Image: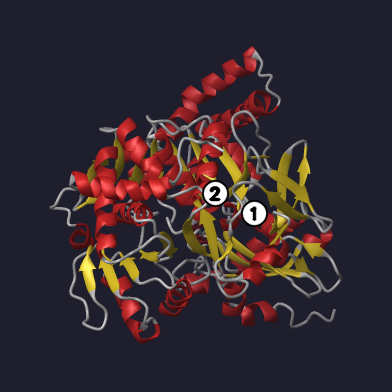
Amino acid sequence: MDKSFKSIPDMLRRNATRFDGQLALKYRKQGRFVTLSYAEYYDRALMAARGLKKMNVRAGDRVAILSENRAGWVIADMGILAAGAITVPIYPTNTPEQIEYMLNHCGARIVFVSSRFQYYKLLKVRESIPDVELVVSFERFLGDSALPVCTFYQLSEVDHPITEQERRELECGIDCLGPDDILTLIYTSGTTGVPKGVMLSHRNILTNTQYLTEQSGAVGDNDVLLSFLPLSHVLERSAGYYTAIRNGALMVFADSIEKIPENMMEVSPTVMVSVPRLFEKIYHRIFENVHHMPVVKRSLFHWGIEVGKQYVEAKFVKRQPSAMLAFKYGLADRLIFSKIRARFGGRMKLCCCGGAPLDKTINEFFWIIGIPIFEGYGLTETSPAISFNNFNHVRFGSVGIPLRDTEVKIAGDGEIMVRGPQVMVGYYNDHEATSTAVEDGWFKTGDIGHMDDGFLYITDRKKELIITAGGKNIAPQPIENELKLDKYVSSAFVYGDRKPYLVALVVPNMERVLEFAKSKHIDYVDLDDLVMHSAVHKLFEQRLAEINGRLARYESIKKFVLLPRDFSIDGGELTATLKLRRKVIYEKYKHKIEDLYADQGE
């Protein structure tokens, strides 16, 4: 492992000196962007640590953060760590009951919150969280006497600079931190049971940021990372936040996921960490625009894509691009791809993608237009990265090659096992779950996959495999990705566990459906009415018949239901990182799904 840094706060301290006046954070405040340099960021973190120590926070204490992404989040995190404590991130989308469980399980006495809204969640369960002594808010509001609250500025005493004596004392504490000390407790989503607190050490995260940096060869002190994935999730925390700090890059907070296109034009990022759903939406939006182009421009676009596909395969996979192919690609790039990249701010070098499988066609498309996606694989328990594609090693459809010092093997039932410096310390206060998940240092990922020529391929989640009544094991995600590639489909959910055949909930691409309705002169009252129309249903029967033709017979979708509205976080169907909550979706649409099997005795 890299011996440069002993801990995450040690990394910030050293880089605050190394990069001094360079910008570390950029965020919107009262309508305009403001910045903090590395030196200013470090001082703000020390102020937070000073305030926490005055509140009797000691080494090893757990301090929670219940907040949306913002500069206060990362300043509070570094303050917690500099005080020797352990950060416990909690998704701002969690319910009061979920928050209650996590706070009681980890024993947090102090909770940082973003706003009154999150504070009221705590107030709702106040009697059930007796250990919580103080709430620290990033925004100013009046609290209730039953649950004391102060502002982050008050805790940090930002009007009082750190004295030299305070700096020495705080840095002495940072010196006492070691690589094997616990850095964070991250609670798993609990979709398969009670949430478990994953204990990650400073070593876990430091090695992950080091190896990601080395194997990507792409992040440096001139880079700008646009951050929008939840910092409560280990992917953004490690790859988007700590990796930026390690390399002296600038971390810019997006206003929201909806404002990403606008923010990209404003800040011209060079690197972005995301999940497949964003790339799917961008891909479909580009092809929607192409669909409305004149025939000549549309033909030129498709010519460029075909040339680009050949060029990417020759350059990055086979590593033997011909001069003629390079010339054709250069022409396509000037005429087509450079204009698309301009919509990303014009400087995007690469994107990192994880959290769920990215469709091969979409991945390849982004490489073609000159914005390579480094698709990788990992879990909360592996800090998170296990493997990823990069400029020197890429196979579309794979999740890349394992990181340095990382061993991967495939168990007899196809489960992926991993051993390396990024594997968690264990589950907090749960020895039984830890011993079940880790044997002889090998972590059981719960994912099914295989290795080919050094590249790792993921088939599906072991616990999400559909086992049909006929005994077939079917991975739903590749089928869902195949459905989502259709121009008429926005989202899809495939079901069929212990059933004789597969069915699907399909969310139409409403722009295309409205266009279809107009061309067919279909009368309708609202979207609910439109998706029930026989002509629309017939259209989707035809589209699914085409898709079924590309699938094995036992993988084909026999029946489906059209939903007028997409799955969402607010609706509970998606996780904070936009993955399907399968159990929630099934329960929510159980009657519609079971109706598709009502006449299965044929």
**Secondary element type, mark 1:** helix
- Residue 481: mark in rendering: 1
Q: Is residue 183 visible?
A: yes
Determine contact: label 1, label 2, CB under 8 Å.
no
Up-down relation of residue 422 to residue 519 (above or below): above
Q: Is residue 465 above or below residue 588?
A: above
Amino acid beneath label 2: Asn
Q: Is residue 561 visible?
A: no
Of the numbered discs 1 and 2, the one sitting upstream in the chain is 2
Residue at the spot 30% in from the left edge and 75% down from the top edge: 133
Image position, residue 54 (x, y; %): 24, 63
Name the residue type under label 1.
Answer: Asn
* In the foreground, 227 or 427: 427
Q: Residue at x 38, y 54 (%)?
A: 81
* Element class at badge 2: helix
Q: Nearer the viewer, mark 1 or mark 2?
A: 2
Quarter occupied by residue 563: bottom right
- Label 1 – label 2 distance at C-alpha: 32 Å
In this view, 51 is above or below 178 = below
Q: Where does label 2 land, which residue?
A: 204
Q: Is 369 displayed left or right of 59 in the figure?
A: right
